[in-house]
């Protein structure tokens, strides 16, 4: 595949800036900030144009915070100005260069795909293997701390093989280097770069390991095969491959039989939501975070208030603990 050129000039075309501006305003939850931004719309659009047309963009500081559900994650948030530029870079540099080289089994962060498509493929593969093999096995893997473990140098090397426009590479590299390690969850560019980072693994699994039934969503992926021994071999080869990418497999990764029930993208093998994170588990976790000074009392009470109406029967002990908390 030829490297893409003449990409950067598309980022500062007026119609593209206007489209990115409207998209960011539409998707920003802080409507007061959006209203203020729209009031001075022409000024902000001209600022974006001037920064990009003179190639003088500097990534602004991130607002960094941590979430604990469904698991602990470091989230980054940008200013409206940086979000618009991030969208422009993603839409008009990364998408044209990266999307054509992705395989259909990679279902994340693209129009018409997503978790729904991933679940649909997984169910179709279950049905196909059941008819073809009767008994089969599934290798379910995910990468440990994927976004935080992405190596900047390896990612840049991969991008140079797809993009020849130096100005486009420069601004993408600025965004990559704006985070000390890995890619920050919360940026549009991070989502696109993350699905691209494991693209070589997709081709390796399909073309070298010859796995016909394979689906991946970001760092979660499934391999279907009638031979358990061959999946064990694939598992070891994938570990070796990811080691070259400076990534490690999550220890929870394992091989299942077709009769086992497991969770993929929040649903079980039948495609139905499974409440494997019960109310009890969530409440225990919130008390643990509070007792270890990770969240404050206000945060704990806000969480528990949401579940107060469910604290009956086996959850009554949590209601009693909730009532014993000091008043704020």
Image (tube, grey):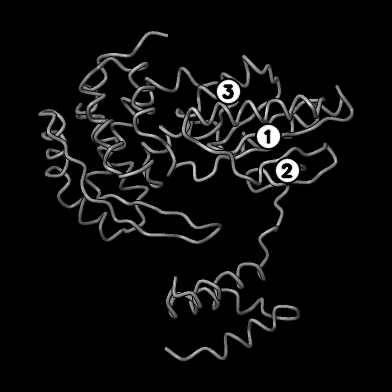
For the point 22% across and 19% down, which residue is it?
A: 166
142 to 61, vertically: above or below: above
Mark toward the start of the polypeptide (2 vs 3): 3
Mark 1 neighbour density, 10 Å: few (under 14) some (14–19) many (20 or more): few
Tell me residue 82's x, y (percent).
24, 44
Query: Which residue is at the front of the view, 112 or 79?
Result: 79
Query: Which residue is at the front of the view, 260 or 40?
Result: 260
Circle 1: element type: helix
Mark 2 neighbour density, 10 Å: few (under 14) some (14–19) many (20 or more): some
Snapshot quadrant of residue 314 = bottom right
Q: Is residue 10 left or right of residue 216?
A: left
The residue that label 1 is drawn on is 120
Residue farthest to the right?
Answer: 134
Q: CA distance from mark 2 to mark 3?
A: 20 Å
> Which dot, 1 or 3, sits closer to the camera?
3
Q: Quadrant of the C terminus?
A: bottom left
The residue that label 2 is drawn on is 271
Q: CA distance from mark 1 to mark 2?
A: 8 Å
185 to 162, vertically: above or below: below
Task: Tell me whether the residue at label 1 lies in contact with that at label 3, contact meaning CB atoms closer than 8 angstroms.
Answer: no
Q: Which mark is residue 104?
A: 3
Task: Tell me whether the residue at label 1 lies in contact with that at label 2, contact meaning CB atoms closer than 8 angstroms.
Answer: yes
Mark 3 neighbour density, 10 Å: few (under 14) some (14–19) many (20 or more): few
Tell me residue 40's x, y (percent).
14, 50
For the point 15% across and 44% down, which residue is it?
A: 44
Mark toward the start of the polypeptide (1 vs 2): 1
For the point 36% across and 56% down, which residue is it?
A: 29
195 to 187, vertically: above or below: above
Tell me residue 291's x, y (percent).
51, 78
For the point 71% across and 26% down, which residue is it?
A: 233
Q: Is residue 284 left or right of residue 125?
A: left
Snapshot quadrant of residue 124 = top right
């Amino acid at each position: 595949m030829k490297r893409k050129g003449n990409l950067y000039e598309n980022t500062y075309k007026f119609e593209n800036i206007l489209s990115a501006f409207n998209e960011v305003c539409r998707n920003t939850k802080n409507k007061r900030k959006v209203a203020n931004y729209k009031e001075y719309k022409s000024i902000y659009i001209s600022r974006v144009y001037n920064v990009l047309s003179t190639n003088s963009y500097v990534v602004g500081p991130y607002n960094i915070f941590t979430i604990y559900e469904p698991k602990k994650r470091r989230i980054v948030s940008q200013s409206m100005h940086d979000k618009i530029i991030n969208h422009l870079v993603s839409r008009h540099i990364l998408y044209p260069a990266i999307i054509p080289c992705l395989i259909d089994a990679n279902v994340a962060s693209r129009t018409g795909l997503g978790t729904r498509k991933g679940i649909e493929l997984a169910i179709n593969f279950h049905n196909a293997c059941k008819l073809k093999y009767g008994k089969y096995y599934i290798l379910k893997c995910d990468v440990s701390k994927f976004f935080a473990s992405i190596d900047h140098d390896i990612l840049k090397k991969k991008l140079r093989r797809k993009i020849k426009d130096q100005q486009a590479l420069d601004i993408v590299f600025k965004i990559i280097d704006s985070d000390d390690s890995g890619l920050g969850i919360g940026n549009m560019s991070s989502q696109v770069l993350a699905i691209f980072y494991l693209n070589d693994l997709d081709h390796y699994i399909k073309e070298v390991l010859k796995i016909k039934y394979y689906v991946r969503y970001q760092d979660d992926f499934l391999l279907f095969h009638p031979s358990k021994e061959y999946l064990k071999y694939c598992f070891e080869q994938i570990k070796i491959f990811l080691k070259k990418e400076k990534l490690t497999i999550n220890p929870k990764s394992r091989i299942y039989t077709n009769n086992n029930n497991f969770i993929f993208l929040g649903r079980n093998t039948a495609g139905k939501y499974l409440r494997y994170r019960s109310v009890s588990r969530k409440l225990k976790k919130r008390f643990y975070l509070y007792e270890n000074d990770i969240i404050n009392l206000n945060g704990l009470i806000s969480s528990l208030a949401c579940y107060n109406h469910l604290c009956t029967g086996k959850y009554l002990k949590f209601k009693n603990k909730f009532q014993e908390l000091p008043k704020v």
